[in-house]
Amino acid sequence: MRRCFVYLSACGLFFFYSQNSTAQTTVSETINPRTTAVPFLRISPDARASGMGDMGIATTPDAFSSFWNLAKTPFSKNKTSIGFTYAPWLKALGLSDVYLATLGFNNKLGDGQSAIGASIRYFSLGNIQFTDYAGNNISQFRPRETAIDFGYARKLSDRLSLGVALRYINSNLVSGNVGGVNFKAGNAIAGDITLYYDGVTSETGGGFAWGVALSNLGSKIGYTNDNQNKDYIPANLGLGFQYTFGIDEVNKLNLAFDVNKLLVPAPPLSTGDQYQDSVNLAEYRTSSVISSWGKSFSDGNGLFKSLQVSIGAEYVYNDQFAFRAGYFMEDRTEGNRKYFTIGAGIKYNVMNFNFSYLVPSGSGVSQNPLNNTVRFGISFDLDPDSDR
């Protein structure tokens, strides 16, 4: 069954390792990326955000606001928005059955002071062939992961809003008895708490916006009946800022900046003492979720090195054409992901078409799974809000 375990591990962890580099570093630095279960929750879920360096906490509201900051939805220019995005994964390897598909929805209620939002993410990891020790085929399995959430947002003032959301996560990587261990689909419940401030004025068409997003705050997830063998989900603290320049009546420029901090402690490093390593690992795995959030600020290589930063720009002409560019970076001790993105958007009547492209970077294991991949999204803005 040895190869079976190899396949199981690969389908559960391939995303993390495919995104992270093993670049050389100095002796004083230790590469120790934070690992979590269900890492598909960290993939940028829509083509517009992907074109701006994977950001969306404080960008203008759209059909995909539920993924980034639900509190943006009461400030939408439309009462109802719905959108779909499809992103092939590891396309450079010739795989056609590995992909992320997302669906976003939001709807303003009553007088527009509040809104509801919902989203679905479906991550297909393709078809996995299980074998025994001799290499004989046993069975095939199609691992997949799903997250479904629903939330409510309300304006606290003319400029500030608050959003809360509840998320159900299902991670079905393998099932049945494997090597004497009974595996099952993992399930978790998580929630988001978000804030959004809209400082863009109708007089100038410009202004400053900011947002705060606490996301995926919830339970650990396990794939067996062993309660001591559960993994953290990617709880995250994000801050976003955007300044809109109203150049004239038809031209505007959005400059945005997001910074994210994964609220998961770094795994313990090896000390060379087998007993002590076992104790450290047991403490790491049995820590409560709430205590792990606090530990994430004081472990690893320091607070600033654990941050992920996105910088993006979006030029919009007549609210019909958009051109985007962005840059994403993280410290080498936390994974060393660094890449540029570009994107474009076209609005026709109620339909919006968005495209993004991740500029190839790195080589070997440091390549990004989205290299040379065009991501596509379509959304519909219904019932324009006459008050905006």
Image (spheres, rainbow, N blue to C red):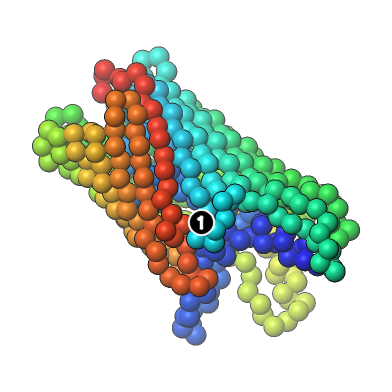
Q: Can you name the residue that lies furthest to the bottom here?
A: 27
- Pick whichever, 150 or 356, lies toward us: 356
Residue 360, above or below 205 = below
Determine crowd level at label 1: few under 14, some 14-19, many 20+ residues with C-alpha closer than 10 A.
some
Q: Say which residue appears at 43% left-offset and 23% top-offset.
A: 107
**250 lies left or right of 238:** left
Tell me the quarter of the image containing the N terminus.
bottom right
**294 lies left or right of 351:** right
Q: Position of residue 12 (x, y in %)?
A: 66, 57
**150 lies left or right of 7:** left
Q: Say which residue appears at 14% left-offset and 35% top-offset.
A: 250
Q: Say which residue appears at 58% left-offset and 35% top-offset.
A: 148
Q: Can you name the residue that lies furthest to the top here?
A: 110
- Pick whichever, 18 or 329, lies toward us: 18
Tell me the quarter of the image containing the C terminus.
top left
**302 lies left or right of 161:** right
Q: Position of residue 372 (x, y in %)?
A: 42, 58
Residue 71, above or below 362 = above
Q: Position of residue 97 (x, y in %)?
A: 59, 49
Residue 218: name its quadrant: top right
Q: Amino acid at mark 1?
A: Lys
Q: Is residue 315 among what the camera can see?
A: yes
- Check disc 1 and report its element: helix, strand or loop: helix
Residue 166: name its quadrant: top right
Q: Can you name the residue that lies furthest to the right here?
A: 180
Residue behind mark 1: 91
Residue 316, above or below 332 = above
Q: Is residue 293 among what the camera can see?
A: no
- Pick whichever, 65 or 14, lies toward us: 14
